[in-house]
Image: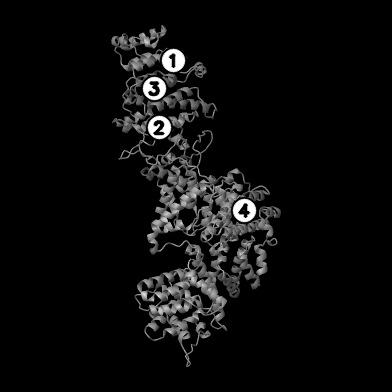
Amino acid sequence: MPHALTGSPWEGWSVALSNAAKRHIRPEHLPLRELAARHPATPRDIADAVILLHDVESVSFVNPLIPKYIEALVLSGSTRISDVLLSLLQHSAFVKHSPSEHEDSLASVFPSLEEQVFSLLRVLVINSKLPVSQWRSKATTFALTRWLHEARKVNEREVGKQLSAGLMAAGASTHTGIFESLGLLVISIFGQPTFREIEKQRWWTARKQAIAIEMQSYDANVLQWLQSQYTGHLQNLIKNRPFRLLDDKGMPIFTDEELLMIIPALPMSNTRAGLFIWLNACLCARPLTDDASVRNHVLVRYSENVQEAAAGLIVASFDVLTNAILRGDSTLAIRSFVCNKLPLVLQGLFSFAEPNASEAAIQGILSAVNMEPLSPLTVGATEARDVLKKTRADFLRACVIHTLVSDAVATAMSPEFSATTAKATRYTREGLMTHCANNTARLETTIMELDGMQGNAGAIAGCLIGIVDNLVTAKDTMTLKSVCNVLLRKIELVDVLLQYTQPADLLTPLYRTLDDWVHDEDQSEFQPPYEEFACILLLVLAIHHRYDLTPHEAGAFATDGFVAKVLFGQWQSFTTAELSEQQIAQLSKWIEGLYATDEHGETTGIGDEVMSHCPPQAFYFLVPTLFEQSVLACKSGQMPVETARGGLEFLLEPFLLPSLVGGLLWIVKRSWEDHADGDILLQILDKLLRPSSSSQDMQDMHKAILAIVATPLVKSLKTLVQQRSDKRKEAESLIAVLTPHLHRGRALTSSGPDEAAAKGATIDELRKAVKELVQWATGGGQSTLPIYDSSVTHAATSSSGYDVVLQIIIDELAVQTSSHRGPIALDICTAIVCAPTPSSYTSLLELSNPLINTPGKGLGLRDMLRQRAANVQALQGLPSAEAAALIQLSRAVTVQSAISPSALVSLSVPNAEQAVADQVMKDLGLTTEGATLDDSLFDPAATFDNDTDFANVNFDVAADATLNLTESQTQDINNLMAADTSGMQIDPSANMFSADSIVFDANQPVLAGDDALMSAAGNVENAEEDIFAGLDFEQETMDFNFD
């Protein structure tokens, strides 16, 4: 209510200021000291006197002297900011009622008193013309918060009128100037660095939450509705001290989203090294190259750009081949990939491109591939060049038969192409199966063509899998034996075969054959069935050993069947008490057949009588016991060692040969020291490791067996040498026999205990590899490719653990980022983390749909990274560079792990899985009929679920999105986690999450919250929650009755 006391101090100030305004007296000429002495009014009375100079009821134009007088009074200390604000609030027509039509018409022309006062006070604070106590006080904070509350209510009334009038769009208000100038004043005061000292005042802790709610509500309900450029600034302020809650250690408490927003985005370069690392991992052990997964990886990597994806894949393929040549590794599988698999993948990629796009792309990129990785005078340079050029010619030939390039272009691109043999014929799976049906010779010839480089390996692989399945169904074990023999003679062919299929596709039918083998005791002869069983079993054992298959990788088999016991059980011997009567009878027959002699001292041999009562599965189960009983008989003197050697030599016959696996592995497990039978074992080993037979089938099978047992047997013999130096000569002689068969597998085997000492060396090798690859990629891959071994990461994780290896990768990324090589290092580190391993590999079809029941996989680097990055709060305890590297790597891995919808288009799956594939396409928004591929289908981010699981977060969503209140949309956590790189520099020695380091810039907008924020903030409007309800404007209690 107005002051009515005649002769009061307020009246004296009012009359004096009014007369001064009428006489246009400048503010510096006001007799403020005399007035204060003559009329000792309170600061609030003085504020009322100057505010009431403006007649808000009849005049919209503000006398320019009034703001000047306010400035003079505040600067002189006659009144205070808080008094001016509260007086302005009490007498403001803007707050009390809706303006008249006349005022509305002038609102856009003349700034209101409120707007001018807010701007004036903001300038005074910014220019430090006022003592800190003036604006860092409870009174000023109270006044500003109250203004925010009342201004928000005014805006709600205006919005209500607009909605009633059918004006649904958000936009400018007639009082936009007041709303924005008030917001700027709050920002200028609450955003002062020294304002945070207010938290030392006792009243602050209990009231800051209510103040923050008003700030957030004003930002969300007023500034956002007005689409103000200052939207988000107040929300940024409340994320900083003194508004933010602190823990018991005085550290600010941040949400996960806020912490992630602080981490700057690090752009990733698509370096030559990145795809080389990933593809090398796909080919270094068991092939992990199903079409959809390869296509998906490159399409996601190159943002659905088919031309770039094809170019990168071609270059990476030749880089992997070059690396194998420089390392001295076998190149069969990699050359086959380049010449047979790569054209098929390219064909799938270019199915989305313009006609003839493949020819131009292949011609352009292949001409840039270096065919001379070594300088001419370097040893091996000529051989390397010849292999690369021959591979290029074979690759072009395959591209011709797959219609990717024309014959004329291929001839022009490679002189070697024109010098090769006549144009190859393109095979089809169906055609080959027709020709090979009931034609064993043709089938064997076709299988041997798997090592060809004419682009037909895929069709041959498909034919082979189909033929095997048909043979198993028809129980044609004789032909199946021929197929197994071909693969055993050249086990490397399986490396090619598995580029087009999974191990389970080949092995599951073979498991079924072995488990369901029918042994007919009434048949005329038993050796041929035994031999068929032996060939099938040995191929299964050889493949399992070559790739170190786990039960999850191996395929379906009965858990209590023969296959499970042989592959994943233990080759162990049993006492007679542990055997059944039938097993004892069978064992006796085998011992008699092997060692019994006639009157001439000749052994009777293994006849049909022995085998007729013993199925093959039972025989292999008894082999370790047979070896143990033989050794014990020699040790006790019941049988000469030479007799044992001669009898066990029967096991070198092809129909019994796989039994050596069980027998030799039993010897490996037998202690040389505890049983005192080392001499006997050495003599037996000498006989079994040096067969005298010249049979080709026997030699091929024996080599396959030695490849399986060589590594553990050599290790056992080396133990013997350490324990008994007198046996060094015999042991080393046997080691020499086994050495050529070492390291024949293509598995990422774990390091043994004797390699534990090399743990540090392995870690150093990983660091060195990262540095060399970064250096090579920095030069654009123009220098000589550094020799790289994909197994170094596996060796490091085996010896030191995933946690240590991940930390090494993060540290290297941080170091390289500080050296301005961050984008390049990020690509390389991402490739290392994403590099597939057999133990954690999941095909794209399995990965893209939860309907497929995928067995549990082992944890990998990617899983460890996901776990560490998910613990966002732990980032506050890390140095800035390390925290940034961790999150940046996690973001990049998440992006690269996306699923490209186009990678699943044309995905070829077995009929049994077609329903699952259809569901995959449906979930991705694709249909198999009339599908239209618009741009949205090629957005990797579109496949992410909008949840808070860190593993599914897309960190690269733009951070400058503006909330559109005219549309129904929800801002999810992905937007909150998007990083803004503007103005963010990392001090590697500092903690970016300290109380003083994290400052959300009030001059930068933040992402709009979701629609729930609007309704939540609006709840404060209710009368029972009105924080200012019931307060008397003339009797300010300053008690912040916010509760």
> Could you give the CA–CA distance between mark 4 and mark 2, rounded to whole angstroms?
53 Å
The answer to which of marks 4 and 3 sits earlier in the sequence is 3
Q: CA distance from mark 2 to mark 3?
A: 20 Å
Query: Which part of the image, by quadrant, shows the N terminus?
Result: top left
Q: Is residue 18 above or below residue 631?
A: above
Q: Nearer the viewer, mark 2 or mark 1?
A: 2
- Residue labelled with disc 4: 346
Counting residues from the start of the chain, the first of labels 1 and 4 encountered is 1
Inspect the image, locate mark 2, and give the three-letter code of the amino acid beneath it: Leu
Would residue 151 be found to the left or right of residue 510 on screen?
Answer: left
Label 4–label 3 contact, CB within 8 A: no
Labels 1 & 3 near each other (Cβ < 8 A): no
Gap between marks 1 and 3 measured at Cα = 30 Å
* Residue that numbered label 1 is attached to: 56
Residue depth check, mark 1 versus mark 4: number of the one nearer the observer: 4
Please rate how many residues cluster around mark 4, counting C-alpha atoms within 10 Å: few if below 14, some from 14 to 19, many from 20.
many
Q: Which residue is mark 3?
A: 127
Q: Which mark is residue 237?
A: 2
Q: Nearer the viewer, mark 2 or mark 3?
A: 3
Residue extending farthest top: 23
